[in-house]
Structure formats: structure tokens, C-alpha cells
Amino acid sequence: ETGVTQTPRHLVMGMTNKKSLKCEQHLGHNAMYWYKQSAKKPLELMFVYSLEERVENNSVPSRFSPECPNSSHLFLHLHTLQPEDSALYLCASSRAPGRGDYEQYFGPGTRLTVT
Amino acid sequence: QKEVEQNSGPLSVPEGAIASLNCTYSDRGSQSFFWYRQYSGKSPELIMSIYSNGDKEDGRFTAQLNKASQYVSLLIRDSQPSDSATYLCAVNPGGGNQFYFGTGTSLTVIP
């Protein structure tokens, strides 16, 4: 599936590092999402950008900072993470609500390990 | 109360059988429903979406929606070993940007 790409695919970082995750969608969508997937837990919606405006921010710690420069690109900036932040981070895209069916399509994810 | 509930399984069926996966949701006003398949170590892959009561068929997959009873199910006919995966149910309650996922049901198809 190349409709939504994510880089890097794997990331190991120390608690004092700063890194960024990148997502790009090639589906012509105008809403993009960041999810966190931890073992035995449902996908947790972190951030949503619709028409390049942030519309959801579900009580995510400030050590996670999203950026959406345009409708095709989404970043998640990471700093001073904790070991419990180790998880699979998934990017998804869809049409914006009210603009037709809005199935979400996921990227391959970034497996993040915080040491 | 969880927004979306699924039996975690594991659910085991023999090859060629019908696998039945169920999902219930708490928000009666929910509009849109989705089934995803997730192989181990991979990201979720959309299988089907359903928006209206009744059945929707796509190949070997049939999604069934009953809004009055607040459940949605996925039937997989002629199950294949390649169908072995975790199946995630997702619900969009109000037509906005919020999607709720279940924890998933692990399916194993035994050759």
C-alpha cells in the first residue's frame, strides 16, 4: 500500500532526544490523523487535521507536537519522551467529514522504542 | 463504558468454514462503521465500510449492521489461512473526525 507513507519505519530514541515522524498521503484526502497503538489497547486517536486545521487533540502530553503544513503532509515532533511512549504510531488519511464517504486509510506505521 | 467492544478471541475456524466476528457500540447515534484487518506487525487495512442497516457483501466478506441493536458483524465465507489476523471494528459516532476502535478479535484459520 503506497497511498499513505510513513518514515522512519523504526525509531529508537533516548529520553532526551528530539525526533520527528513524517507522514505523506497520495490519495487526495484532506484529513489526516495520528494514532498510537499499544499492545492490548484500542487505537488511540492523538491528533486530527481536517482541511489543514487541527480539530482534535485528545489529551495528548505536550511532548508530542503535531504539524500539518499542507493537506498531504503530517509530522509528529517528539521530545523528552518516556518509556511508556514506546508503541506503534500510525498515520491515516480520509476525506474531510461532509465530503463523501470517509474511510480512513493507514500508513505502515513507525515502531517507536524509547530507551 | 467502552465505546466499541469486541471479543478478543482467539477465534479459531477450520479452513473453508464461515468466520463470524461481532462488534457492539455504545453511541446510538453512530453513523459509520468500518472493519479493518491487521496482520501481526503490520498496520490496519480497510476491508469494508457500512453505513446503512442490513447486509453489504464484497467477495467473501459480508458486513451486517443493526443500528437498533447497536451491533455490527463481519462474516468471512470460505475462510483461508491467509485470513488469520486481528480484525478491528471502528465506529464514527457523529459524522465528524472522531473514530473509535475496538481492541480487535484475533482470528486463526486452521488448514
Image (cartoon, coloured by chain):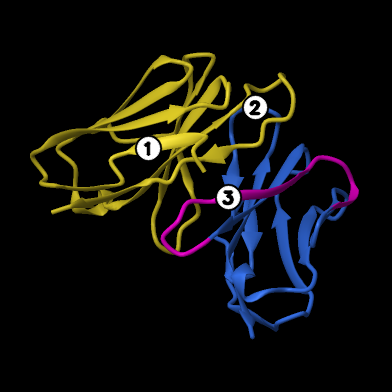
Q: Where is residue A68 in the image (x, y as percent from the top left)?
A: 39, 18
Q: Give the range drawn in magenta.
A: B39-57
Question: Is B90 rendered above or below residue A70?
Answer: below
Both marks 2 and 1 on one chain? no
Residue at 19 percent across and 42 percent down: it is: A81
Q: Does the magenta stretch include residue B47?
A: yes
Quickly name the residue at label 2: B96
Q: What colour do you see for chain A?
A: yellow
- In the rendered structure, which amino acid carries the disc numbered 3? Glu
The answer to which of A45 and B57 lies nearer the viewer is B57
Q: Position of residue A8 (x, y in %)?
A: 28, 40
Q: What colour do you see for chain B?
A: blue
Residue at 72 percent across and 45 percent down: it is: B33
The answer to which of B1 and B64 lies nearer the viewer is B64
What subunit carries mark 3?
Answer: B
Contact flag, marks 2 and 1 (Cβ < 8 Å): no
Element type at marker 2? loop
Q: Where is residue B31 in the image (x, y as percent from the top left)?
A: 77, 37
What subunit carries mark 1?
Answer: A
**Hey, which quadrant is residue A115 in on the image?**
bottom left
Quickly name the residue at label 1: A6
Q: Position of residue A35 (x, y in %)?
A: 44, 41
**Hey, which quadrant is residue B89 in on the image?**
bottom right
In this rendering, position of residue A80 left or right of residue B61: left
Question: Is B87 rendered above or below residue A85?
Answer: below
Residues at marks 3 and 2, CA–CA distance in whole angstroms: 21 Å
The answer to which of A8 and A77 lies nearer the viewer is A8
Quickly name the residue at label 3: B45
